[in-house]
Amino acid sequence: MTAERLAIFGGQKAFNGRLKITEPTLPDFDDIKEGTRKILESRMVTASENVRNFENEIKEYTGAKNAAAVSACTTGLLISMRTLDLKGEVIMPSFTFMASGHALLWNNLRPRFVDIDPQTFNISPAEVEKAVTKDTCAILGLHIFGNPAEVRALEKTAEEHNLKLIFDSAHALGSESGGKKIGTFGDCEVFSLSPTKTVTACEGGLVLTKHDDLHSKIVMARDYGKTADYDSVILGLNARMAEFNALIAINSLRMLERSIERRNRIADIYRKRLEKLPGISFQEIKSGNRSTFKDFAITIDHETFLLTRNQLRAVLEAENIEVRTYFDPPLHRQTLYKTNEKLPVTDAIASSILCLPLYSHMPEIFATTVCDVIAAAYENSESIEKVIG
Ligand SMILES: *Cc1c(COP(=O)(O)O)cnc(C)c1O
């Protein structure tokens, strides 16, 4: 592709309509028609048969002992931390979506941000170990973009220091660590079923745990924290899942294995084509693990790629290609969380990261086109620098 063909120089855009960074993969109307009719006729519109069926299918799929469907990952995290009765500091990565931190603040818990591993972008177990103090009550792990965290090392640290271990597993429904599904680690794992995630309920979440007593408390907490005879015993809220959402989630879950296969295939296309260019690096998925590729992230090294991340972003946006800089700014740089912690790896990754379009029903040819544009941007970096500075 020559310089003139690029849209920032007035060439025709690579996509006429906008190529979105992500889109939910949804069931056909015909697949949910009968289920919807049943919900309406039964007049049981929340926390009923579909929710129970969804929870059972999730247990079967992940191998988790207990599953509680909730209204969102955020509310799931909130009630998990509340029912675990945490007090003090929670060690967590700063390189995440703000909801991970918000759940702490709603519980009057203090985040203690630690750095991530430069290869996997996941929380570094060595940094976690160093950050433990007498005020630490828990670790909040995360499988960033679906890449499984070092679950066993984190479990070991939690056990040695008598800490609770919670995972924000929003990106990781379908991910695997050493042949075991994410959802079976730590004290509990909390998933998101919002429209950008691998399984969607339109809006929703899930709390999976091996502890029966914790599960019972979460089931109570999602329903105002009340017992059958209207005694409120824990501070709960309404975090129930509605029947229609569970019906969508059941149908979405049935597409999950195929979705992950397709996402991994598209990620392969991106990697094989982009690794030929200097200055582009990828998130490392450790062998024996499976990522959902909830997002496909690259990092741009300005020195060798000859363009900055923001310059490349401008080139792609001009072509009608939507990209995102997840998670820039990281939490420790946001107004609500500003701290003095030095997190050099987090800062370096956040300032160079770019997430490319990827969704389960995305045609593979779209990924090829995105790669062609990135290659053309590299080849024409000098002229681009002159235009966008
Ligand atoms: C999407 C997301 C959440 C929030 O999920 P909701 O279901 O919208 O509450 C939490 N944590 C991470 C890492 C996320 O990406």
Image: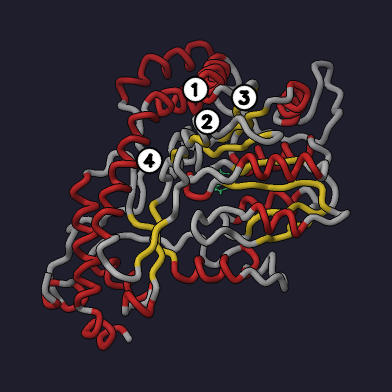
Residue depicted at 52% across the width and 50% down the height: 144
Instruction: Report the residue marked by disc 2.
Output: 181
Badge 3: few (under 14), some or many (20 or more) residues near its Cα, within 10 Å?
many
Query: How far apart in space, not on screen, are marks 4 and 3 (Cα)?
Result: 23 Å
Q: Earlier in the sequence, mark 1 or mark 3?
A: 1
Query: How far apart in space, not on screen, are marks 1 and 4 (Cα)?
Result: 20 Å
The answer to whether the residue labelled 1 contacts the one labelled 3, judged by CB atoms less than 8 Å apart, is no
Residue type at the position of mark 1? Tyr
Q: Earlier in the sequence, mark 1 or mark 4?
A: 4
The label nearer to you, 4 versus 3, is 3
Query: How far apart in space, not on screen, are marks 1 and 3 (Cα)?
Result: 11 Å
In the rendering, at what x and y percent does residue 271 appear? 30, 54
Query: How far apart in space, not on screen, are marks 2 and 4 (Cα)?
Result: 22 Å
Q: Earlier in the sequence, mark 4 or mark 3?
A: 4
Instruction: Report the residue marked by disc 4.
Output: 24
As drawn, is 360 to the left or to the right of 84?
Answer: left
Q: Quadrant of the C terminus?
A: bottom left
Instruction: Report the residue marked by disc 3.
Output: 67
Query: How far apart in space, not on screen, are marks 2 and 1 (Cα)?
Result: 8 Å
The answer to whether the residue labelled 4 contacts the one labelled 3, judged by CB atoms less than 8 Å apart, is no
Residue type at the position of mark 3? Ala
Residue depicted at 39% across the width and 23% down the height: 254
